[in-house]
Amino acid sequence: MINSIENAFGIKIDKLKKLSGYDNENYLLVSGKSKYILKKYPFTKENHKLVTAENDCLQFLNKEDPSIYPKPVSGIEGSLTEILSINKKKYVFRILSYIEGKFLGEVNHDKKLFNSLGSFLAKMNKLMIKYNNDAISSRIWEWDIQYLHLNNKYIDDIPKAENKKLVLYFFQQFEEVVFPKLPYLRKSIIHNDANEWNILTNKGKVTGIIDFGDLAYSQLVNEVAIAMTYGSYDKDDPLHYSTIILESYHKILPLKKEEISLLYYLISAMLCISVCNSAHSRKNNPKNKHALISEKNAWKMLIALSKLSPVYVENHYMKSLGFTVKKKKKVNQLIKNRHKIISPILSLSYKNPIAMDRSAFQYMFDIHGKTYLDAYNNVPHVGHSHPKVIEAASKQMKKLNTNTRYLYDIIQIYGSRLLNKFPKTLNKIYFVNSGSEASDLAIKLALSYSKNKKIMVMENGYHGNTQRCTDISDYKFNNKKGQGKKDYIIKVPMPNEFNSKYSKGKNGIGIQYANDAIKNIENVAAFICEPILGCGGQVPLPGGYLNKVYNKIRNNGGVCISDEVQTGFGRLGNVFWGYEMYDVIPDIVILGKPMGNGHPIGAVVTTDDIANSFGKGVEFFSSFGGNPVSCAVGLSVLDIIEEENLQENAKNVGNYYMSELKKLQKQYKFIGDVRGSGLFIGIEIVEKNTKKPNTELAQKIKNNLREKHILVGTDGPFNNVIKSKPPICFTKENAKTVVDSIKDILKKL
Ligand code: PMP
């Protein structure tokens, strides 16, 4: 090889050292006192065309500003590329001048250096705006941000489901926000790869740039977005560092508002391209470490960006460049507007309500761009805006959405998948649109099956908002303003272990409460109860309780209903359904909330016998219940729980969360009880000495947590139990944030 190159380029080669890491082969070539870079590519027409274009661009830049860009060296016949045969294979060779300097990746980063990076790139871009090249302009490939979608095919090469979901999330954000705007942005040929191993520095300043192999005719703003990405992705405060690059770039080549507004998405797109290609390279060639260098940092920054609102980032960049940001309406005004059309009977959370704008997984973002850690909402079970749920819904919506009077596969597939989660005896399913509808239907089923007429309900129980649901929800009918208990309702005392009226005794608290419950069991068609009483203040049922009550109900011709609207779908960690905690099998199960991750869907699961008896009555039909889109959404939720191992996560993070809260309980007597299972937790706030409910303090903690950007709720008969039931992708770090913040609040009391 050496002889052929010496002959072709007329250069005597004293030393040739292979440089590691690049896709193509690169060598350091030493000839006398001069150093060069020799580049070798397998010969293909496409490669030849592109390196010829690259040389052309480098010649253009060198004419304008020599010494900071590699200069192509011509062969003895004047050509900048030579096609040579080595061992019967054809290769393209080219030689470039060697640019001295230390890589940006190997020096300390400070403001001066990053300032010089921004201005360096802006100066280069100002030149390149004048440059045209058809070979570059017609290039369409994965490393150009405008063609992000071409990386779709690599997403499945990412091994961890929780990483995959992040990438899918940013892909969807890009498609939604950036894609429609791309055609209207300025375009130019850009270097397109200003990463820390392509930028050269000397004495704390950027002095050169190499590797023009990624040249692209792309949106101009992509150049600075790429530099901002690689300049800040290893930093704990990426916004700070990326802003320095942006400001200095903008001083020389001013950006337009519409370009700046997209930077959040362009940076995340760049990171996605990087991690997709790393995953793909790892799969194809696990030994190529170079491709993986940037992977760790790219994930770090993607995670950091998922916690930041795009609005916050946009405002930050806009302000730093001296642009004014759009003022949002004041929350007070929004409340006034709301009350003009929406009754205040629909209450708002917090003394200082939050105007929400968007969300990602366990984070919610308000209209001002503030991030809230969502430690409260259990409807977005697998995470807010989960891309797989969105994809499932929109795909099915584009294909077919109809009702259960027609045959379609997805109801069959989803129905079977869901029923597989239950014991064999629970083998019939009815789809509805909410937990309330499911509760309502469950009572209908029970009344049609049992000859009895009364419904036995739990003190502080809540089952929904319809009239029937209100009848069976002590939480509502027993409210000061409530309708009162109807005659067909039997109410049984809440079997709480904390501040219980019973001491353990030889039978245990559960049996004593069960004995209370079964005293008056005649003519009961159904007993309905949640496995952990949510509105009761996250109260788990004591051991032995359900078993005894269920037996008695059945012996008297009634059926047992478990309301799993809050507790189902793996949230409790150890079990998928709440009733499994107590070694019982209900006759009817009610599902809702988490089932569709925010899409309105509910279901009733029951036995053959009950379904048969109901089947003899009037037709049951729900216009939307069981529609294909809802089924697709529900199916995606089941898939995600499995793929991301979320039940296990609920268990591990829940155990950690609870143990940290229990440590806090030891320090602060205001915490009377910490209870629950998995990520369904209650913290009962009490008077220090008397252990009586301390509603005021619970409200104070809730409101103070809101000021610290953490969402929780309060509930229980005295509204003194802090409820935490976050999306089950919640992490230990998230749990620690909540516990530390509660500690902080209690410390200041
Ligand atoms: N059952 C329980 C236990 C619930 O918590 C709720 C809602 N909070 C419902 C039923 C009613 O569900 P939805 O609001 O979806 O109608």
Image (cartoon, rainbow, N blue to C red):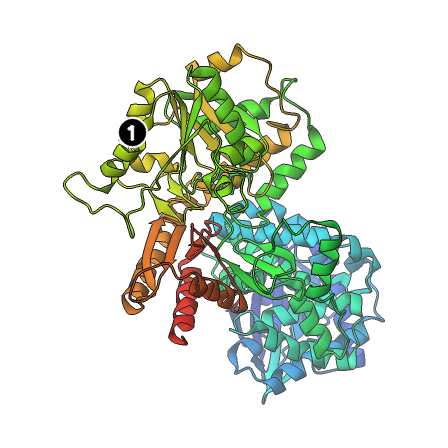
Point out residue 420 in the picture as x, y percentages from the top left corner.
42, 27
Q: In this rendering, is residue 380 above or below 329?
A: above
Residue type (three-letter) at the residue carrying disc 1? Lys
Quadrant in the picture for the N terminus: bottom right
Using a 10 Å C-alpha cutoff, classify the residue at mark 1 as few (fewer than 14 neighbours), some (14 to 19) or many (20 or more).
few
- Name the outermost residue toward the bottom: 203
Point out residue 230 in the picture as x, y percentages from the top left corner.
59, 70
What residue is shown at x 44% (from left), y 36% (from top)?
Answer: 564
The image quarter containing residue 26 is bottom right
- Left or right: 216 as drawn, with respect to 227: right
Q: Which residue is mark 1?
A: 519
Q: Nearer the viewer, residue 537 or 216?
A: 537
What residue is shown at x 28% (from left), y 35% (from top)?
Answer: 516
Label 1 beta carbon less than 8 Å to ligand 1: no
Q: Residue 36, can we see it?
A: no
Quadrant in the picture for the C terminus: bottom left
- Left or right: 430 as drawn, with respect to 493: right
- Left or right: 53 as drawn, with respect to 428: right
